[in-house]
Amino acid sequence: MQQRSSSAPMFTASQAPSGADRVLAAYIDAALRQISAVLQQVALGHLDPTYVAPPKPRDGDFRLADGTHWNPGNGPGFYFYLAGAWVPMFAAGGGAFRAPAYTVAPASPTENDIVRAAAPWDPGSGDGLYAYRAGGWHFLG
């Protein structure tokens, strides 16, 4: 066990910091309160609009695009990042995104197509949602 240096300052619950320590303590307290407020909003499901494209998105990221300053392609709304591109989570004009069900592979898929695969067609992971990216179908869930 290490011994604590007697020259290092130590604060107890009954001892308030003074001078420069008080300024630092107030700054840290304010920063932690801001972080706490943001985490509470995220925990409640809140997302602030994003006005610029994230610089290094990764598969699985999701954002609320403002649609004016940053428009990933389908106007304002929620998008998720998959295989190098942002995919809209809802249909243009609002409402839930309704992916069409396919029992055979679509004849001419285009980049960003989202479909619902149903038996007997299986693009790789069984029934579910797939996005067409970079020449192939990617399972969404």
Image (cartoon, rainbow, N blue to C red):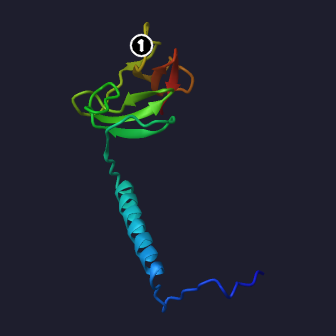
* Residue type of the residue flagged with mark 1: Thr
Q: Quadrant of residue 107?
A: top left
Is residue 74 depicted above or below 24 in this figure? above
Between residues 56 and 99, which one lies in front from this camera angle?
56
Instruction: Identify the residue position indicated by label 1 in the image.
Output: 110
Q: x, y percentage for residue 32?
A: 42, 67
Q: x, y percentage for residue 56?
A: 49, 36
Q: Quadrant of residue 53?
A: top left
Q: Quadrant of residue 29?
A: bottom left
Between residues 44 and 73, which one lies in front from this camera angle?
73
Between residues 83 and 1, which one lies in front from this camera angle?
1
Q: Residue furthest front?
A: 19
Between residues 12 and 21, which one lies in front from this camera angle?
21
Q: x, y percentage for residue 22?
A: 44, 80
Which residue does the image show at 35% across and 36% down from the upper left? 52
Is residue 38 depicted above or below 130 in this figure? below
Which residue does the image show at 39% across and 57% down from the upper left? 43
